[in-house]
Amino acid sequence: SNPQGIALDVDSIYYSAFDSGEIIRAQRDLDATTSITVASGQTSPTSIALSKRNVYWIQSSAGATGGVYVADKLGGAATLFETIVSPYDLAVDSTHVYWVARDAGGVVQRRAIAGGAVETLASAQGSVYSLVLTSALAYWTVRAPSGGVPGAVRGVAK
């Protein structure tokens, strides 16, 4: 059903099923008989990331307001973690959920897993795409705009 995002932990593989609106957990050997639906009834889930206990994903429809959603890895109710306009990718570390969004000219933001205010790490980034984390930095890609200007890989301290 058109899988989009994918993430791994020690035991399982998690993926978002865009067309059916599900977040699925399966064994790493992809044995379909052991797959479970972690969350269902989602609208176009895409990028996915894991914390120790939870699975986070982006829900968006063609530039509309969407958000980051969260559910327990074992399944249960999906809840809205943060509303975001035009979210694109996300990553999680031990303390925060990070995302890139094309709202307001392209932003890199984060919010503590425990809650609190959204922090903007970078703004006016253009068409942001992929996001990865190290222990100290957040990196993201920016698509080249028209007119021969090159794209970029950028980073900022977390």
Image (cartoon, helix red, strand yellow):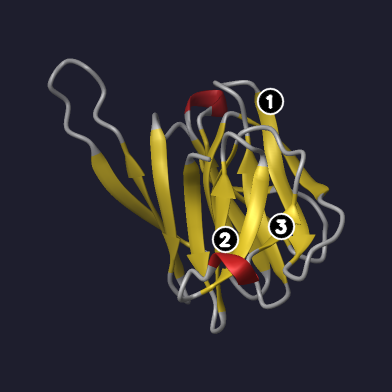
Between label 2 and label 1, give the one nearer the viewer.
Answer: 2
**Res. 65 mark:** 1
Q: Is residue 13 above or below residue 129?
A: below
68 relative position to 1: left or right:
right
The residue under label 3 is 37
Three-letter amino acid code at the position of disc 2: Ala
* Element on which disc 2 rests: strand
Q: Mark 1 to mark 3: distance in Å?
A: 25 Å
Q: Badge 2: how crowded within 10 Å, few (<14), some, or many (20+)?
A: many
Between 32 and 67, the one lying in front of the other is 32
Identify the residue shown where x is 66% and y is 39%: 21
| Residue 10 location, quadrant | bottom right
Between 83 and 4, the one lying in front of the other is 4
* Residue 138 at least partly seen: no
Three-letter amino acid code at the position of disc 1: Thr
The residue under label 2 is 49
